[in-house]
Amino acid sequence: MGSTYSTDNDEPDTATNRCDGFAKREAQHLSTLRSLVLREQQRQKSEESRSFLPTIWRCSHLLSLNATLEEPSSSSIGTASDIEAHLVRHAPSELTFVRGRCQQFELLLAEFTALTKMNASLRNIFTNDDHQFLERVSTLLGMHGNHSHASLEFVCDAVCAGACSRGTIPAKDAIELCFETASVLNFIILREQSSGVPADDELVLVDVERRDISAEATMMNSMDNSLLEYAKSSRDNDNYFGGYTGDPGATAAGGTGTSAAAAASTIAKAGQVTMREFSEWQRKVVPDLLHCSLTKFLQALLFPPGRSPSHRQSPAPFPIVRSSQEITSPQTASKVREGGGRFIMPISSHVFGENTASTTSNRGTATSSSLLSPPLFAFASISIPKFGEKWYRIFAGEVDGWTFQSLEHSILGYEGPTLLVIQARNNSSSPDDNRNSNKNKTETVTLGAYAASKWEKKKRDFFGSSDCFLFQLQPTLRVLKSLPKMGTRGGHYMYFHSNTNTNTSNPSRKDDLALGLGFGGTVRSPRLFIDSRLEECKVSPQDTSFEEGNLGLPPPDDLFSSHTSSSSSTLRIDSLEIYAVGDEETIRRGFKAQYQHRDIADATLRNARTVDKAAFLGDMRNGVIESKAFAHRGQVD
């Protein structure tokens, strides 16, 4: 069956049928929702105080379900209870499902408490007149107007309770609100994908899985560090632009005065940034941060599944980590299909955690975890379209083996973008620590690169495209994009060299090229380089192909230093994973090309092992191959 909240009867999406970017029926839904929510809030004044969010959630679901009935209740009905009374008679099972969703939503809000900060901001929007309400919602959903500015204003208003000090915003609180909003949205999306029309076994409330608070705090701190680092760098470089004037003697416009510098230092230490700084940081580092969290959440809140402004259910904005066996192994793919898409192969990642909630022994598959992995949230914030919805892990050192041959077999032939993720530690750590050690947590670094092109073997030079970029997730989130190629400078994107004798005129003479894979730099010293033993990762702060920035541990004594060290450093690799990323069609083509590549390689190997028996015997008779088998012929003659 289809979705419970289908809207196939909506009017055609034409300019004359639209209001503030919404189709006519959608605008009517929002206007009715606003009136109903305000009446509910008025009715609840004498009762125990209730959060504004659950009221909106409940009313939007009731209105959407009522609109699908052949005999909908009259629009003049005054309260949500009146609509429920009508639905009890005409759609009792669907109403039970809606009530279950409302209870589930309450459980989510109890777990992700940062969302309660949105109550006052939403109430301010709903108390506007009808035209202003539609205009504000339309802008927040990106239908028209300055969506980015409106979204940031909403977040600022929420975390500061409408009273941001001196035009600034607490960086960590804003990022935390975005993450928790995204976490609730992720749960909603996964539940919608797994349920559809209600069935008895789907009405059971699902407990929120145990959150990894430590992992969440690590990622939030990393994003907070990134924002504060950007703000400090802007002020240090006399780009101090905004919203904070400091004391009366400060020079706010240029930030060159002594008092302005002191004010900038104080505000950074307090974890405060201006809205302009937040906006510029988001544009440069995490352009989809607000879209994948606030915008998508508000869309799900106001338009239950099936009633999105785009007339179709939007794709999940957060990637799901999956095993490549779901595609490459027919047996595994069959098991996943048998589960109707609700089950996936369990895998564990040092960086992304567990991808499933509970195992299913009869098929060896499991249900997807409903928790949003903090690093996956960071990647979704960097780019939703670039990474796609499903990531298929094609290599993991702990699973496939810590050999360069295993890595080479996993990535060669796959014609599509890949994401290389490394978790490492400072090389000064004790040599007795093994890859599974939990020591030196304070020195853990998570970094990697996005490879936009397929990997190629036997190259003595760089390849790839300018879509490649370097990144660091921990301890400070950084995205280092490619630089424009200028003549012979730049263009050193991807590097892969696995044979020291490749293309040399004298096989006994070994070249001095770096043996391994990397990005940027030179063929003898790539900027990000993994050696052929898969033990060490060498990183440098700058080259001519990617933006300048530290990869690895920050310079000593100053976490927010905008200056980079000129020397390279070496990290010990604890975890190395490579994922096939992109849209479904790109991934399908990529694996298909790899099948063909491996078939050709296998055929070539078989041919090399096949000996022409007739030619072999002829060579023996003619003495080309020394043998005593035909020596008697000469003796007889």
Image (cartoon, grey):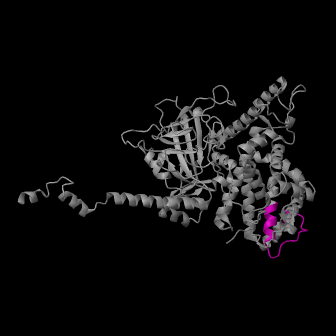
The range drawn in magenta is 59-82
Along the viewing direction, whichever of 611 and 69 lies nearer the viewer: 611
* 601 to the left or right of 632: right
Q: Picture coordinates of residue 337 (x, y %)?
A: 55, 66
Image point (13%, 58%), residue name: 630
Q: Picture coordinates of residue 360 (x, y %)?
A: 53, 59
Of all residues, the one furthest to the bottom in this rendering is 70
Residue 77 is a magenta residue: yes
**Image quadrant assignment for residue 561:** top right
Of all residues, the one furthest to the right in this rendering is 129
Image point (18%, 55%), residue name: 623
Of all residues, the one furthest to the left in this rendering is 636
Q: Picture coordinates of residue 435 (x, y %)?
A: 49, 38
Q: Is residue 506 above or below residue 44?
A: above
Q: Is residue 410 above or below residue 217?
A: below
Residue 369 seen from this side: no
